[in-house]
Image (tube, grey):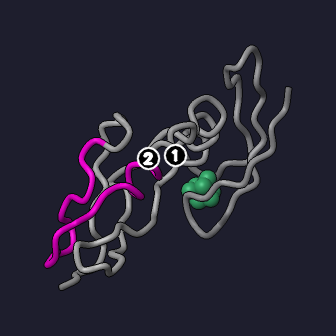
């Protein structure tokens, strides 16, 4: 099976072609650098995403947050549930942890904008 992808590693957006057999990536072509090969392998075998959202604060004001790292794509719904049920106490600063170990992924959800 052949999969076509566009690398998101940099603005060049190389068009990648991956040959996949039994769920394994056999080869990647079209990549200008190693990032593209790694991106194709991850995207096909274990896709991940960085999550951005807002968390409610104790003063009723939404606070922008994001995942401190990439989370498995199939865990995003559960991560969002944890984010939606969380409440942070103001004031908060950039990098403060709003949710620890979101959905058991080992990834924290951190504040991206100072709020008070
Ligand atoms: S393969 Fe390398 S050069 Fe091409 S888009 Fe990805 S990161 Fe950029």
The image quarter containing residue 26 is top right
Residue 51 part of the magenta-drawn span: no
Establish if 80 lies above or below 75. Answer: below
**x, y percent for residue 9:** 55, 58
**On the image, numbered disc 1 is attached to which residue?**
76
Which portion, as a residue range, is magenta?
Answer: 80-101
Does ligand 1 reach within 8 Å of label 1's beta carbon?
A: no
| Left or right: where 86 falls relative to 14 | left
Instruction: Report the number of numbered marks.
Output: 2
Residue 74: quadrant of the picture: top right
Quadrant (top left, top right, bottom left, bottom right) of the C terminus: bottom left
Q: Position of residue 46 (x, y in %)?
A: 56, 32
Marks 1 and 2 in Cβ contact (< 8 Å): yes
Which residue in the rendered view is the most extreme toward the right? 1
The outermost residue toward the bottom is 116
- Circle 1 residues within 10 Å: few <14, some 14–19, many ≥20: some
Tell which quarter ligand 1 is in: bottom right
Q: Residue at x 31, y 57 (%)?
A: 86
Q: Secondary structure at mark 1?
A: helix
Quadrant where the N terminus is found in the figure? top right
Per the rendering, the mark at residue 115 is none
Instruction: Pinpoint residue 75: horizontal percent, then vertical percent.
Output: 50, 39
Which residue is more in the foreground, 116 or 43?
A: 116
Q: Is residue 3 left or right of residue 82?
A: right
Question: In the image as oriented, which residue stretches furthest toward the left?
Answer: 91
- Disc 2 designates what residue? 79
Which residue occupies the foreground of this view, 28 or 8?
8
**88 and 102: which one is in front?**
88
The residue shown at (81%, 44%) is: 4
In the picture, residue 97 is in which quadrant?
A: bottom left
């Amino acid at each position: 099976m052949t999969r076509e992808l566009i690398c998101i590693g940099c603005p060049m957006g190389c068009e990648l072609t991956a040959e996949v057999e039994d769920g394994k990536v056999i080869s990647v072509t079209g990549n200008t650098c190693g990032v593209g090969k790694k991106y194709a392998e991850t995207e096909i075998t274990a896709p991940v995403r960085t999550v951005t959202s807002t968390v409610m604060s104790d003063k009723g004001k939404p606070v922008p947050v994001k995942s401190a790292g990439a989370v498995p794509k199939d865990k995003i719904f559960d991560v969002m549930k944890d984010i939606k049920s969380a409440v942070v106490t103001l004031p908060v600063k950039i990098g403060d942890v709003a949710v620890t170990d979101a959905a058991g992924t080992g990834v924290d959800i951190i504040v991206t904008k100072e709020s008070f």
